[in-house]
Image (cartoon, rainbow, N blue to C red):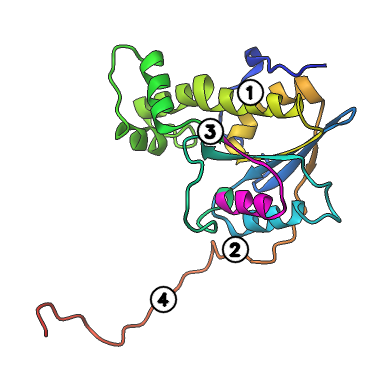
Amino acid sequence: MLYNPNFDLYRQWSPQPDALRPPYVAVFRRGAKTLVYLCDAHRMNKSFDMVDWVFDRANFPKPDVFLTEMTNDDNGRTGTCNENTLRYAAATAAENGVPVVFADLSNTQMVAVLDKCFPDNKFSQDDLEKVFNGAPVSNRGVWGERSIALNRHGRDKFMLQNIAAALNTYDTVYAIFGEGHFYCQRLILEDMLGTPQIMDAIPNMRRDFGDLKVKPIKLIEFKAGEK
């Protein structure tokens, strides 16, 4: 059986007030195939815990391949792997001897998708920041519309194609993408693999400090021009 995403089932992101809050894990199983989908909240401490949790052999089987939401022109990139959960997850997979796939579009490819979706405009890579700032989660006017189009016709499509290619080659596939991508892709994944088991009881070892307000004190005042 070959896995082919049915993009007609794609759904546009919309606010879900009662939805499960990320991070959480969706586990799909069909026959010998397993997809462990890490629904990420980028940079949250608990998301780092999620990565550690799924790579704990007591909780999940070792993956044959790992897909991450990093741009596919990023191969060989150096630098720290703890800046966000996507890099941390890629580093964790590599440390465990698991092949890593950067399964998001490059900036050049994103611009090409936007040019195709909006032929009356000419986009540049500088415009991508506006697109991301107007992401569907914010619904910010025209740039929000462009973000939706970029995800539907470019990024989510490429991610799903990578997932299908991985399932057609390997038995156990891990993928980490932002939770918003999972919402948009979910019906397509269920069409291929059935209803997932949702797992959100992630041990929060690092803690999160979203409600904590730090009140700094001053020891000295800066004086410009002082030698």
Q: Secondary structure at mark 2?
A: loop
Q: Which residues are magenta?
A: 87-102
Label 4 or label 1, whichever lies nearer to me, is 1
Q: Give the CA separation, mark 4 to mark 1.
A: 47 Å
Name the N-terminal-most of marks 2 and 3: 3
Give the structural element (helix, strand or loop) at label 3. strand
Question: Left or right: 206 with respect to 53?
Answer: left
| Dots 4, 3 in contact, CB < 8 A | no
Type of the residue with mark 2: Asp
Circle 4 residues within 10 Å: few <14, some 14–19, many ≥20? few
- Quarter of the image with the C terminus is bottom left
Alpha carbon separation for disc pair 2 and 1 = 34 Å
Residue matched to label 4: 215
Task: Judge by depth and name the residue closer to the eye, 188 or 83.
Answer: 83
Q: Are marks 4 and 2 in contact (CB under 8 Å)?
A: no
Instruction: Give the Cα separation between the discs numbered 2 and 3.
Output: 27 Å
The amino acid pointed to by label 3 is Asp
Question: Of label 3 and label 1, which has the lower sequence position?
Answer: 3
Pointer 3: what residue? 104
The residue that mark 1 highlights is: 161
Residue 25: image location, x then y, percent: 73, 44
User: Residue 171 location, x and y as percent?
Assistant: 82, 33
Quadrant for residue 115, please give it: top left
